[in-house]
Every structure is written in structure tokens, then in C-alpha cells.
Image (spheres, rainbow, N blue to C red):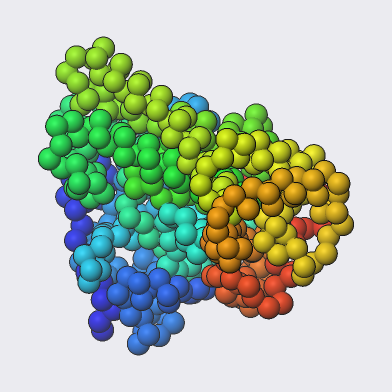
Amino acid sequence: MTIGWHFNNTYSKLSETFKENIKPIPVTNPDLVILNKALASELDLDFSKIDKEELSKIFSGNLLPDGSNSIAQAYAGHQFGHFTMLGDGRAVLIGEHTTKSNAKYDIQFKGSGKTAFSRSGDGRAALGPMLREYIISESMNALNIPTTRSLAVVKTGEKIQRETSLQGAILTRVASSHIRVGTFQYIAARQKENELKTLLDYTIDRHYPEIKNSNNQALDLLNLLIDRQCNLVVNWMRVGFIHGVMNTDNMTISGETIDYGPCAFMDTYDPKTVFSSIDQTGRYAYCNQPVITKWNLARFAECLVPLINKDKEKAIKIATETINSFEKKYEEKWMNMMRDKLGLFGLDDKDKFLILDLLTWMHEKKADYTNTFCHLMNPEPRKNRLYEDNDFMSWKKRWEKRLLNNNNSPKKYLKLMKNNNPIVIPRNHKIEEALEAANQNNLEPIKKILKILEKPYDEQIEINDYQLPSSSTEKYQTFCGT
Ligand code: AMP
Ligand code: MG
């Protein structure tokens, strides 16, 4: 049967240091829950002629495709600031699939059983969190934010023990690669320069071939990653995404968002918003995300020091200066992103005050972040008394005055706003509802929310229910180690 897999497994050809050769542990009774046909087609894969039983075997890892060569990858990471040796403790990379246009993607099973890196974990994952990752990662992609993707979720037919007994599941994750800041940290900690150079060469070959012939590849890679991660975090801030566990092992070198554990979208605007139950100090709060991005990039720079310059002191000085370019870059990109959200063309000295005053108002009045921008784009459909507030009205007059400086038609500024302000995001309570139903074998709510989130920038009929924040006053909490 031709599915269209084309495996070319370059990472598994690296030395033993980088991985453990291991197959997914077979599961008792695999049962396909969801398959991403649109993504399959983007990958030039065709599953249309395969029955559900066979698909269940494929996406549980019970039936490995020809050409695959599965491994668990070694990596380390700073978790909440503390350095730990980690690795794929509940995932295996079955190989790198190459599309007809020569794009290469890691195909990874998450929840596939114990590996050498499992420590005290069971190597498994639960249905709820795997479906949650599926929904949010696909939504991020539709929001035009770089992300790993989700190809399938399969129930294993096995129970796993968390606080309660849960249904086990496996997610097929698709990524440009799974190389992380933590991968560099793992190799750098071994203090063998040849291994570090191998990883650098591999990374450049795979993600940044444009610097292959540069004089200082390590420094160029650092600069490129600063740019990519800066763009990424600005995008998160744009839509109110809170990653929740920005440990260095959860930061990719490709610049894709990875690891949808305790993440969630902010509803009421509050810069200090934290959803993760274990983030007691708010290290990964909404407003800290840029600061932590820089912190993680500094850890990346430390790994590269031996390759930046033979003279260690010189290398540290160069790396520090480079990392310190982050704030300026971030500020500029963030300002431009906020200008786009407000439909502002060109630059005006007073833009920063205009933007900050709106955010301050939203914070004080507990306004919904997403819906405030929706209101600015189109105040009519859902009248909301909040926006009749005097302070808001006078802010709006300033904004309208600034729009006049645009020298552009309302059509043009509205288009800019519409491209940058989602009218629907994955609302926490709607995801919970869909997951709850899926746990009871009802997949309709998941299908519905996925369909709506496919086009987050488009007007859609009858989605009011998906646009409103939860009416519950209870604080939403998310959990790690799921
Ligand atoms: P995460 O919080 O998903 O980023 O995971 C952090 C580390 O814990 C990674 O090395 C994971 O592979 C590992 N891990 C998480 N859950 C499990 C589990 N159930 N069994 C084994 N390892 C796990
Ligand atoms: Mg992780």
C-alpha cells in the first residue's frame, strides 16, 4: 500500500551520544481518534485507502513504516531555572519524512512508552492532554504562528495512572526538527568540542543553510535564533498565548512553538496572567515571556562560546553583546505588531503612549484582550457596555485621529487589523468541554471547535459561543507532567 512515506533519517545517523535506538512499546488495543487529513496532504501522504484498524496500528507505533528508524533523542534543559539532564522520556522520533518539494519533517510519537530517558515516568500520555495539544497546535498554525503540528491521536486501549486512572493515548507530532536549546546544552555539558561542532553543522545544514559558508557560523546561528525567537514571542503576545513552561528544553532551534503542556490563551487582559498550577512565582507569566526568551537565548549562547572564538574571554564578550541586542529588537517588533493590531501605518512618536494607554485601560477594566480588538474592528454586532466607558471613548478619539495620519483608506487599515487580530481563539472552557466529551467517546465538539479554529481571522456565522470568555469566575488552571 502506498502512503507516501519517504524517510531519510539523518539524526539517527549521528553518534550514540545524541540518542538511544529504541522502538515504540506496542500497545494493547490501538484505536484512532483523530487524523489530520489536511496536514497529511501537506506532507504528500495519502491515508485515504487505509482502513481505521490499519491507521490505528500505524499511529500507535504498533506497525512501523518501512524506512523508519526510531530513536529517543537526548537533551538537557533548564526547568524553572534549574539545569537537568532530560531526553525523550515518553516519545520516539520514528524518522524524518521528506515531501515532494524536499521539505523535511520529524515524525514523532508522543506517549510511546519508556525510554532510557524516562527517569521515574511511565513513558505514556493521557488522551485529554494529547487532544489538547492537537487542538492548540493546529490553532496556532491557523493563526500563522510557527509551531509543531499534530497529525493524529490514537487511544492505546491501556489505562494510565495519574491522580486518577486515565485513557492512554499517543500523539503524532510533526516538526521541522526537535532540536532544542536543551539539545545544545546536553552536548555542551559533555565538553567535547567535536560533538558540539557536529551538532552545529547538523543544525545549520537542516535549518540555516544560508550561513553554511560564513566565517563565524556559531555567532551567525545565535543571531538568527535571536531573530526567530523574537518573532515567535511577539506572535504569542499578539494573540495572548501563554506557553506556560518555557524551559530551555521546550525552545526549538527552528523557531517553532513546541510542547503544549500547561499553555492557555489569556482572556481578560492582565500582564501577570499565569495558568500553570506549578508556576507559583509567575516565572512564565504573559508579560515575562520576552524576558524568559532572552534568558533562554543566553543559555544557548553559553553553549556556543567555544565555537564563537578560541579566546574564551573574547567569545563571552561577543556572545554577551549579541544577546543584549534582544531588547531593542523585541521592542521594535512588538511596537510594529501592536501598530498592526491597531491598523496604524507608518510611525508616530506618540504611538507608544497610545498603545500602552489602551493596554492599561484593558487591565483596569478587566477587558477581554481578543474581543477588545474585535470591537475596534467592528463595534456593531455584540454591543458591550464596557466600551461605552468615558476613558475608552476618549482613547478611541485619539486612535481615530492617529488613523487619519495613515493617509490610507479605512478599507486598508481594517485589512491590516483583520490580518492581525483573531476573532476567535481557543477559549479555555470550550476546549475543556470538547475534551470532556471526547473522554466520553463523543468527538463532535472537538470536530466543531477544530473547524472554527481553522479560520480564526474570518467572519463566521454562529460562533458567538466560541468568542465569549467563560462566564465562570473560577480561575482557570492548567497542569504539567500530564
Ligand atoms: P515536558 O514537561 O513534556 O516538557 O517534559 C519534560 C521532561 O519530562 C521530558 O524529558 C519528558 O520526556 C519527560 N516526561 C514527561 N512526562 C513523562 C512521562 N510520563 N514518562 C516519562 N518521561 C516523561
Ligand atoms: Mg518538553
Quarter placement of the N terminus: bottom left
**Residue 44 falls in image quadrant:** bottom left
User: Residue 207, how many percent across, how many down?
Assistant: 26, 49
Q: Can residue 449 be seen?
A: yes
User: Residue 400, how many percent across, how many down?
Assistant: 69, 52
157 or 430: nearer the eye?
A: 430
Looking at the picture, does residue 12 appear above or below residue 104?
A: above
Q: Residue placed farthest to the top in the image?
A: 313
Q: Can residue 472 be seen?
A: no
User: Residue 323, how many percent across, how many down?
Assistant: 38, 26
**Residue 381 falls in image quadrant:** bottom right
User: Residue 275, how many percent across, how many down?
Assistant: 66, 44
33 or 393: nearer the eye?
A: 393
- Count the labels in the image: 0
Q: Please tell me which residue is depicted at 37% across the width and 36% down the height of the picture.
A: 226
Looking at the picture, does residue 119 appear above or below residue 397?
A: above
Q: Please tell me which residue is depicted at 32% across the width and 70% down the height of the picture.
A: 43
**Residue 351 falls in image quadrant:** top right
Q: Residue placed farthest to the bottom in the image?
A: 49
420 or 6: nearer the eye?
A: 420
Is 143 on the left or on the right of 398, as rendered?
A: left
Q: Please tell me which residue is depicted at 31% across the width and 34% down the height of the picture.
A: 222
